[in-house]
Image (tube, rainbow, N blue to C red):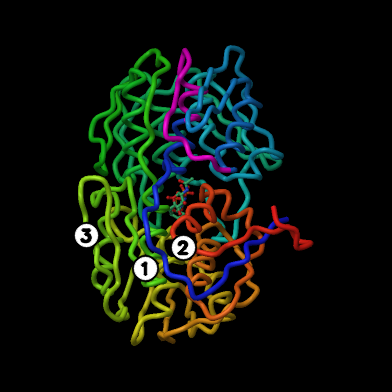
């Protein structure tokens, strides 16, 4: 296993390019491999372990995938398998995306039930309910979800869960509905930019989806989808992470390849905290000339403040003046990183889904552990501004969602080394 050794006291200065959006690539690759007839080519694909894991899942189902620089070639499945086994699905929850498309294309699917993870139990009842609305018969037995339907039939459904819309269920059901008979209306659909990117990709394949970017998606079923070429949108969360990292180190960084429309709540909250964001057509210059102010943040589905940026903004607020409150409304117990930040000298108190953060001005380096990919990113970010050295273990979490994180940060003034557990540099 590898660790990152982050030297503190650095200030970021320069340009950081944003990679393609992980959470867009995953369902798009599934759609290309299972729903399409003919080769698809995806551009702007980040080099991440999650993309490799998904490619392995798709190869397991019979597809051929090839990655060349940042383009992913996907040849769909001629002789499609309908089973996604536990050994592959357990590595990545997003493998559940194959469920809807397999039923739509083959009339049946057997997909391992994904487990919980460090950010909570993460149920899939909405995925199942959505498929049942489309006429599938779904059972759960011995750790597997079995779903079957001769042909899915379009219908109206309300797909909202107790914590709002579900990104995963919206993607799954939207993909399944493209090949259903008749029209499907999903009310309470997730509006995240990566859901819109998936919908645009499906339309380019020949699907007929209306209401893209809104909470009501209307999907007119078609008989067949073809392969196509698509450039994946840039990663809003990666961009948000670099913007916060710049603010944490009081740097002067141009984050290239992001638009204000992709990160409205992140921009708003950082501005409220005193971070200056100067947008142009290609990206944003981030400077932090004044003290960071404590603010209150509530995580919500898009266009609200994303749960995937909660850990990062918590890291920034540890260094703010005054007290901040975070309410985590999406993954209500996603706070393992708080204990790690406290080990570095932060003052964070947890009370259920609420975190109270008293700003401390400065953190000090310590050995810490990445519990999920965003939690890992914040430890690297605060480590760069801390006194002394921070050793972040379980780096594989970070590699799931950040392409060459140390390379991108070292290029703008960080001092981060990747070492193996026995201390050898990699
Ligand atoms: C996706 C993202 C993840 C992000 C999350 C919320 C991917 C690969 N992952 O995860 O990074 O944190 O969106 O923006 O895109 N829920 C149910 N029943 C369900 C499904 C979800 O109750 O069947 C609940 C969840 O427990 C959670 C909320 O709905 O409280 C939102 O979850 P969801 O949007 O589905 O998250 P994912 O798609 O798993």
Are the residues at dot 2 and dot 1 in contact (C-beta closer than 8 Å)? Answer: yes
Numbered disc in front, either 2 or 1: 2
- Between 362 and 264, the residue placed more toward the observer is 362
Q: Which residue is drawn at 40% across and 20% down?
A: 179
In this view, 40 is above or below 364 = above
* Residue 390 found in image quarter: bottom right
User: Which residue range is magenta in the image?
Assistant: 29-48
Report x, y in % for residue 280: 20, 50
Report x, y in % for residue 370: 60, 64
Report x, y in % for residue 252: 33, 64
Q: If you read the primary sequence from the N terminus, does the residue marked by circle 3 or circle 2 appear first?
A: 3
Residue bearing mark 1: 251
For label 2, the SS is: loop
Numbered disc in front, either 3 or 1: 1
Asked whether, in this view, residue 77 is left or right of residue 274, the answer is right
Q: Which residue is drawn at 38% across and 13% down?
A: 223
- Between 385 and 273, the residue placed more toward the observer is 385
Indicate which disc residue 342 carries.
none
Asked whether, in this view, residue 269 is left or right of residue 28, the answer is left
Dot 2 crowding, Cα within 10 Å, few <14, some 14–19, many 20+? some
Residue bearing mark 2: 413
């Amino acid at each position: 296993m590898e660790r990152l050794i982050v030297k503190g006291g650095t200030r970021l200065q320069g340009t950081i390019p944003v990679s393609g959006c992980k959470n867009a690539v995953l369902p798009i690759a599934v759609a290309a491999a299972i729903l399409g007839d003919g080769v698809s080519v995806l551009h702007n694909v980040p080099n991440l372990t999650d993309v490799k894991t998904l490619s392995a899942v798709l190869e397991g189902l019979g597809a051929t995938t090839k990655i060349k620089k940042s383009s992913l070639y996907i040849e769909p499945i001629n002789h499609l398998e309908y089973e996604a086994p536990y050994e592959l699905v357990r590595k990545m929850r997003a493998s559940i995306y194959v469920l809807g498309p397999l039923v739509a294309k083959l009339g049946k699917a057997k997909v391992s039930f994904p487990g919980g993870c460090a950010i909570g139990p993460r149920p899939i009842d909405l995925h199942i309910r959505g498929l049942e609305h489309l006429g599938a018969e779904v059972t759960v037995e011995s750790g597997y979800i079995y779903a079957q339907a001769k042909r899915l039939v379009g219908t109206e459904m309300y797909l909202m869960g107790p914590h709002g819309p579900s990104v995963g269920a919206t993607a799954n059901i939207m993909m399944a509905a493209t090949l259903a008979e008749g029209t499907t209306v999903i009310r309470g659909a997730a509006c995240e930019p990566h859901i819109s990117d998936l919908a645009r990709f499906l339309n380019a394949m020949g699907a007929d989806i209306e209401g893209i970017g809104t909470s009501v998606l209307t999907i007119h079923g078609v008989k067949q989808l073809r392969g196509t070429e698509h450039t994946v949108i840039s990663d809003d969360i990666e961009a948000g992470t670099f913007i916060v990292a710049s603010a944490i180190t009081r740097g002067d960084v141009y984050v290239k390849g992001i638009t204000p429309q992709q990160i409205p709540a992140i921009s708003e909250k950082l501005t409220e905290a005193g971070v200056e964001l100067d947008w142009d057509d290609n990206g944003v210059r981030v400077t932090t000339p004044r003290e960071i102010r404590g603010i209150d943040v509530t995580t919500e589905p898009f266009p609200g403040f994303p749960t995937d940026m909660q850990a990062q903004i918590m890291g920034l607020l540890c260094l703010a003046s005054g007290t901040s409150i975070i309410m985590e409304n999406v993954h209500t117990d996603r706070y393992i990183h708080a204990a790690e930040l406290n080990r570095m000298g932060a003052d964070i108190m947890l009370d259920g889904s609420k975190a109270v953060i008293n700003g401390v001005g400065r953190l000090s380096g310590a050995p810490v552990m990445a519990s999920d990919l965003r939690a890992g990113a914040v430890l690297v970010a605060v480590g760069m501004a801390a006194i002394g050295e921070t050793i972040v273990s379980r780096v594989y979490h970070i590699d799931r969602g950040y392409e060459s994180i140390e390379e991108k940060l070292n290029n703008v003034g960080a001092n981060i080394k990747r070492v193996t557990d026995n201390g050898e540099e990699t």
